[in-house]
Image (cartoon, grey):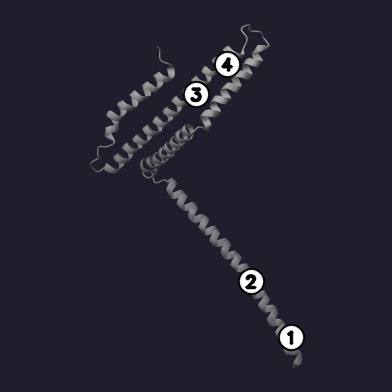
């Protein structure tokens, strides 16, 4: 029996992953040496993170390809049972409706499954790791050498600015409260002075 394109894609991907792990994947485990050790380790780690992202992305693509094939299989099955043998122009609307319903049902089942959520969670996690690793590499190799502010420094400045604004707002509120209290005291003091002046 001939293999489907989904199975072939999956086999190719599995073979690629095994080849990577047995060749380049081992480089990640080799400790870096020399004066550029830290930078080399970061670059190798970044490469590993990129491969993890690519792996998760490919797996999700294979899963979606499998779902497309399943939807097509269901569609073909429904066509043989529900559609008439003779094709008329007005049947295209029914065919289109059947196609939408079949694909919607199939994808809803897949999107509600725990497999999809764990798959997307893993892909998102690897994507965040990739972004973080990429940002660190850019900061280390591009921004710092030319003395430009890094994202970390900008975030820190924004945090400090936010804290200063909050402190200034609190101080302004306290000052307003103090002014009101002082006004109340001066009014009370003037009221106390008036009766004593009347007596004299």
- Compute the Cα span from label 3 to label 4: 16 Å
- Could you tell me residue 36's position as x and y percent? 27, 42
Mark 2 neighbour density, 10 Å: few (under 14) some (14–19) many (20 or more)? few
At horizontal 45% and vertical 33% (from top left) the residue drawn is: 119
The residue furthest left is 34
At horizontal 70% and vertical 85% (from top left) the residue drawn is: 192
Q: Is mark 4 on a helix, strand or loop?
A: helix
- Describe residue 136's horizontal placement relative to residue 33 as left or right: right
- Could you tell me residue 111's position as x and y percent? 52, 31
The answer to whether the residues at label 2 and label 1 have Cβ atoms under 8 Å apart is no
In the picture, the disc for residue 67 is: 3
- Compute the Cα span from label 2 to label 1: 23 Å
Q: In this view, does 66 lie above or below 186?
A: above
Q: Is mark 1 on a helix, strand or loop?
A: helix
- Compute the Cα span from label 4 to label 2: 80 Å
Residue nearest the viewer, comparing 131 with 164: 131
The answer to whether the residues at label 3 and label 4 have Cβ atoms under 8 Å apart is no
Instruction: For marks 1 and 4, give the one nearer the viewer.
Output: 4
Asked whether residue 73 is in view, the answer is yes
At horizontal 63% and vertical 67% (from top left) the residue drawn is: 176
Looking at the rendering, in which quadrant would you find the C terminus?
Answer: bottom right
Instruction: For marks 2 and 3, give the one nearer the viewer.
Output: 3
Quadrant in the rendering for residue 195: bottom right
Mark 1 neighbour density, 10 Å: few (under 14) some (14–19) many (20 or more)? few
> Which residue is disc 1 drawn over?
194
Sequence-first tag of 4 and 2: 4
Sequence-first tag of 3 and 4: 3
In the picture, the disc for residue 78 is: 4
> Which residue is disc 2 drawn over?
179
The residue furthest front is 81
Sequence-first tag of 2 and 3: 3
Looking at the rendering, in which quadrant would you find the N terminus?
Answer: top left
């Amino acid at each position: 029996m001939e293999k489907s394109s989904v199975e072939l894609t999956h086999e190719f991907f599995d073979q690629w992953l095994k080849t990577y792990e047995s060749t380049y994947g081992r480089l990640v485990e080799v400790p870096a040496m020399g004066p550029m050790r830290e930078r080399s380790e970061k670059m190798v780690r970044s490469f590993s993170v990129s491969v993890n992202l690519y792996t998760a992305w490919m797996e999700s693509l294979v899963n979606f390809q499998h779902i497309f094939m399943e939807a097509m299989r269901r569609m073909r099955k429904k066509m043989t049972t529900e559609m008439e043998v003779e094709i008329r122009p007005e049947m295209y609307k029914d065919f289109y409706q059947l196609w939408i319903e079949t694909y919607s049902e199939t994808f809803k089942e897949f999107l509600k499954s725990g497999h999809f959520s764990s798959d997307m969670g893993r892909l998102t996690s690897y994507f965040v790791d990739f972004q973080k690793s990429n940002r660190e590499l850019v900061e280390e190799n591009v921004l710092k050498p030319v003395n430009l502010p890094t994202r970390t420094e900008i975030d820190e400045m924004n945090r400090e600015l936010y804290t200063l604004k909050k402190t200034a707002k609190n101080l302004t509120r306290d000052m307003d409260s103090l002014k009101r209290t002082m006004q109340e005291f001066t009014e009370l003091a003037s009221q106390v002075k008036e009766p004593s002046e009347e007596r004299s």
